[in-house]
Image (tube, rainbow, N blue to C red):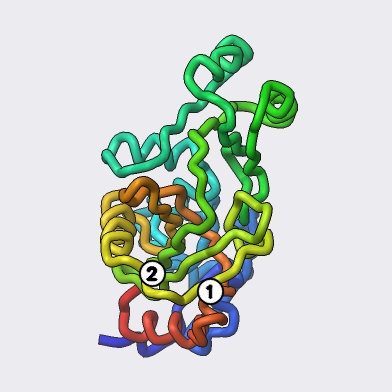
Amino acid sequence: MTHTSKIIALEARLKYCKNVMTLGVRPNFSDYNNKEADLIRNAKKIYYPTTFYADLFDVMGKKTFPSYHTYKCVQDKIKQSALFNLLKIPHPRTKVFYGNRQKKTITDHFQFPLIGKIPRGSAMGRGVYLIKDKDDLDAYLQMTGPAYIQEYLALDRDIRVVIIGKKIVHSYWRIASEGEFRSNVALGGNISLDSVPSKALDLALHTAKKCQWDDVGIDICMYKNSFLILEANMKYGKEGFRKAGIDYKKLMETMIDNEEI
């Protein structure tokens, strides 16, 4: 079965897909005109509704893509880490410290160097800090609410696996630039299309399935012969697709037509 009419999207991610009608995001629903409001109400599924509308559509029982569960973890490292622990998904040792009393105990749990992250709202490697000593730690604690602390793993590369719907659509290595501990492409990391180990792909699929994520870039590292999930990116970049010659727009059009998403 394939779609015979255009599907409805709010965010602009599918704006250039020929089988998608993008209405835009209006936080005040009353700002949609009557035709647009009816299209939203009558659609069986809304694509890229934003976190705000994903919550509302879930209350209505209306399906969304990405899924409601995907939106619940967007740019929220605290929720992701808690979910990984609940589901026993391998992940670097991580602990969140709330309030000054807890933050004073960070070095009771971790040795320098360690990683500190801005736990919510950060992406593309920004908000990730290599903390080498007490001065670095004090500076990090000045800029954040909860302190999201993770063990430091000496890595020069990681793996990005992109899952859309229920399948892997792309995977590649990200190699950190010289002198940089982060491998993010936005920070100068290089993309390598060398073969990705099947165990890493299996772990990515397992993680997406258990977490009920259906549009996600999962970052994985290999450390001491084991694969670990670093984090999930629901707003992943497209450079890896361009590097591999994959037309993202056509990919999404086809998956929509085939009702894979």
Could you tell me the amino acid type at mark 1? Gly
* Mark 2: few/some/many CA within 10 Å (<14, 14-19, 20+): many
User: Where's the N terminus, which quadrant?
Assistant: bottom left
Residue 131 relative to residue 217: left or right:
right
Position of residue 70 relative to residue 89, above or below, is below
User: Residue 200 is drawn in which quadrant?
Assistant: bottom left
User: Looking at the image, is mark 2 or mark 1 earlier in the sequence?
Assistant: 2
Quadrant of the snapshot with the C terminus? bottom left
Q: Which secondary structure, mark 2?
A: strand
Q: Check disc 2 and report the residue beneath it.
A: 164
**Mark 1, other Cα within 10 Å: few <14 / some 14–19 / many ≥20:** many
Residue 240 badge:
1
Residue 235, above or below 226 = below
Residue 142 placed where, x, y %?
74, 25
**Residue at the spot x=59%, y=68% of the render?**
190
Of 40 and 150, the residue lying toward us? 150
Give the distance between the C-alpha atoms of the residues marked 2 and 1, in whole angstroms: 14 Å
Residue 36 in sight in this render: no
Residue drawn 45% across and 78% down?
7
* Residue 187, image x, y percentages: 68, 59
Tell me: residue 86, above or below residue 258: above
Q: Total marks drawn? A: 2
